[in-house]
Image: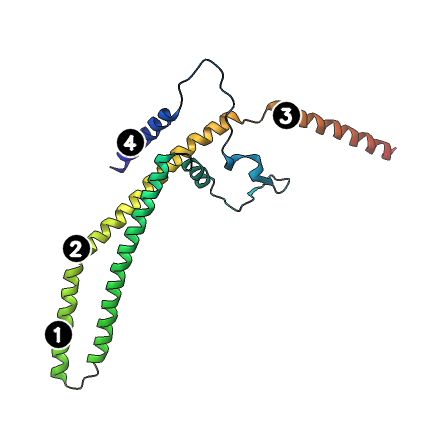
Amino acid sequence: MKTHFFFSLVLSVGLYSCATKPESKKVEPAKQEPPKALTKENTVVESLESTFLRKDGKQNLLEELYEELSEKDEKLIALNQTRQLIYKNSNELLTEKVTYENHSTRYYESALHQIKTINDTVLQHQLLTKLSRSKQLLTQKLRSSNAYHVQIDANTALINDTHTSLKFLLTLALMEDYQKNNVPENEKFSTIIKQQQQFLQRLDSLLKTIKN
């Protein structure tokens, strides 16, 4: 089922991408500006080993690209808002349920401790029986909500997986477009190599002078 859903998602993203692209014309389009997350101003070379770090400390480029993409798309804005609302509502409900269970558990633990201090064994047994019945009633009351809790957790996991897939597919298209339009020119590499070779020749000449 998940596999079928994933392929449906891929198809949907493909159709979405096609729908957002203007009709092709014979005139050569201007070079598209890369996303802000991929501009040169946002990266800095830290060493000769070319270790790149983000100035703002962020390291999840996929999330940055998706956030930038979302800011320009009303459908994605609405999608993200709905997801946040669902998460907020489910989190509040589950917190309420857990609090309810914790209060009940704490009460039963306190009651058990108190009942065990009773010296009258007959009375103690009667109260322990009532305590046991009350706990059984609580278990029955929670049977439905526990099942709902499990379903909510499963749905949350599926939503997270599907949303991650969506973010990947959308940002992958963005990244591949960037890669296509921003390939470093080979001539620049050749120029640097030529400069290096000329500098090495100068160094060699100086060394020969010193040796002589």
What residue did someone put label 4 on?
Answer: 8
**Camera sees residue 160:** no
Q: Earlier in the sequence, mark 1 or mark 3?
A: 1
Query: Given the current orientation, which residue lies at the most extreme top position?
Result: 26
What residue did someone put label 2 on?
Answer: 144
Residue 15 percent coordinates (x, y): 33, 26
Residue type at mark 4? Ser
What residue did someone put label 1 on?
Answer: 129
What residue did someone put label 3 on?
Answer: 188
Residue type at mark 3? Lys
Residue 88 percent coordinates (x, y): 32, 51
**Camera sees residue 171:** yes
Q: Circle 3 sits in a helix, a strand or a loop, which is it?
A: helix
- Identify the image quadrant of the C terminus: top right
Q: Circle 1 sits in a helix, a strand or a loop, which is it?
A: helix
**Left or right: where does residue 69 sit relative to residue 198?**
left
Residue type at mark 1? Thr
Marks 2/4: CA–CA distance: 33 Å
Q: Earlier in the sequence, mark 1 or mark 4?
A: 4
